Image (tube, rainbow, N blue to C red):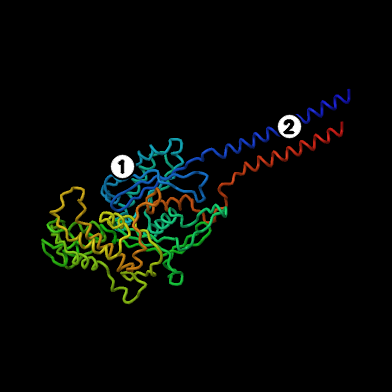
Amino acid sequence: TMFVNKKHFTSAIVGALVALSIIALVLSLVRIEDVTLPPTVKYGMVFDAGSSHTSLFVYEWDSDKENDTGVVSQNLSCDVQGQGISSYANDPAKAGDSLRECLNKAMKVVPAGKQRDVPAYLGATAGMRLLREQNSSAADQVLAEVTKTMQEYPVAFKGAQILTGEEEGAYGWITINYLLDSFTKYSPKAHMWVRPEAANIFGALDLGGASTQISFMPESSVMNWNETSKFTLYGYNYNIYTHSYLCYGQNEMLKRLAKELIAVRGELGVDHPCYPKDYNETISLSSFRTSPCTNQSDPRLILGDRNVTLEGRGNASGCLAAIKKLFNFSACGQRQDCTFDGVYQPPVRGQFIAFSAFYYNFKFLNLTKGQSLATVRETIEHFCTRSWENVRSPQWKRLPKYCANANYILTLLLDAYKFNETSWNNIFFRMKAGSADVGWTLGYMLNLTNMIPAEPPTRVKGHVPSLWAAAITFIILTLALGFAALLLLLWV
C-alpha cells in the first residue's frame, strides 16, 4: 500500500509540474502575441500663426516610439480662412473664432477617446512680433482670445506664444533634419542607432510674409559663439548659426519697396519697375502706418492720406536695382562674414532646404527642379517683361508680385547670404519631406513634447524579449521537471 501511495504521489507531482510547464509556456506565448498587437497611436497639433495666414497641422506617431526616433507623420493640414491673427488687432475675438473651422476638422481625425491627451500649441511668428512691437496690449488681447477658443476644445492645450525669430529658424532646422533622418538612423547590420555623417546635416532657409530666417552648421573655426544656438540631440551636440530678419519677409518687402519708389518720385503717379506693363495699383499713404516696417517718418514723403498710383513698367533690371536698395550692404564694409545692416554671418556651408515663400515663388516660375543659376536669372528676367494685358486667368491674381518676389529671393540669397554660382547648386526648393510639410511647427512640437531626447536611443528595434523569455522559461521548467521526476523515482 505504501508503494502504491508513493507511486500515486509521484505521478501527481509529475503531472502538476507538467501542467505548470504547459501553463508557463502558454503565458509566455501570450506575451509574444501581445507584442504583435499594433501600438497605440498618439497625436499632437500645432497652429502656425504667421503674418499673412494661419495653418493647423495634426501629427501622429506610435506611442512605443515616443522619446525615441520613431517617425512622426502629418495627419492633417488645414489652412485657416482669412489673414493672420495679427490682422485682428482691432477685433481680437475674431482671431479666436477664425480657428474654429480647422479645430473642428482636427476633432474629426483624432479619435474621441484620445482627444483630451492631445498636446496642442499655437505659435505666432513675425506678424505678431510686429504687432507686439507696435501695440503690446493688442497683441496680448489677440493671444488671450486665441487661448479662450482653444480651451473650449477637448485637447491638452499647452498655450499660445510668440516665437522669437531665432526660435522660428532653429525649429525649422530641426524639422528638416528630423524628416530627412539627418540626426540618427537605425542600422539593421549593427543592430543599433547610428549618427549619419555631419555632411548630411541640412541648412534651413525660410521666407515668410514679415521675416526671413537662415540656419545652418558652419565650420566651428569661424563661428562667433555669441550667435550660436546649441542643441543636444540623440547624444550629439549641434552648434548652429541662426538669424532672423524682421521686416524682410516678402509682404513687408513689397510695402517697403512701394514706399521707397514713392518717396523718390513724390508724385501721384509712380513707375513701378517690378509690376507688369499695363498693370496699375492704387495705394494710400496711410497704409504705410499699419506696420512698424514702413511707419518711420520719411522727409521725402508728404504726410497725409493721399492715394498714389503705381504704374507697372516690366523693367527687369530696374526691378533688381530697386530691390537692392532695400538692403544696407555698405554697413558691412569689406567684411566677408557679414550679410547686410552689419549683421554677422559665417560663410554658408553644406546643403540647404529653401521652403515657404522661397518654394512657392519658384514653384510658380517652375524653378524648383535644380536649374542652374544662369537659367534662373534668365527665366526671372523673361517673366518680368510680360505684359499684364496678356494674362486673363483669375488665379494669377498674385502675378504682379512674382517679379519683385523672385528678384528679392535672388538678392537675398546671392548678395546677402552670399551663395555663389557653385553653392547655388546646394539649395533645394522643397515644401515637403516624406509625408510632412517643411516648416517650424514639427520641430516646435518635437521640442516641447521631448520627443527628441538629449541622450542617444538605447532600445534595439526588432528584438522581441518575450520570445526569449518563453524559450528560457520552458527550458528551465522542463529541466526542473526532469530533475524532480528523477528524484521522486529514486525515492520510490
Specify whether 283 is left or right of 375. Answer: left
Residue lying at the far right in this picture: please name it: 2
Decide: marks 2, 1 in contact (CB < 8 A)?
no
Residue 223 in picture, x, y percent from top left: 43, 70
Residues 278 and 250: in front is 278
Residue lying at the far top in this picture: please name it: 1
The residue under label 2 is 18
Q: Quadrant of the N terminus?
A: top right
Q: Amino acid at mark 2?
A: Val
Specify whether 101 is left or right of 282. Answer: right
Residue 36 in picture, x, y percent from top left: 55, 39
Q: Mark 2 falls on what kind of element? A: helix
Disc marking residue 398:
none
| Numbered circles on residues, count | 2
Residues 193 and 366: in front is 366
Residues 408 and 385: in front is 385
Q: Amino acid at mark 1?
A: Asp
Few, some or many C-alpha atoms within 10 Å of disc 1 (few <14, some 14-19, many ≥20)? some
Disc marking residue 97:
1
Residue lying at the far left in this picture: please name it: 268
- Disc 2 to disc 1, how far (Cα)? 68 Å
In the rendered structure, which disc, 2 or 1, sits on the residue that comes first in sequence? 2
Few, some or many C-alpha atoms within 10 Å of disc 2 (few <14, some 14-19, many ≥20)? some
Residue 339 in picture, x, y percent from top left: 33, 69
Residue 396 in picture, x, y percent from top left: 20, 51
Q: Quadrant of the C terminus?
A: top right
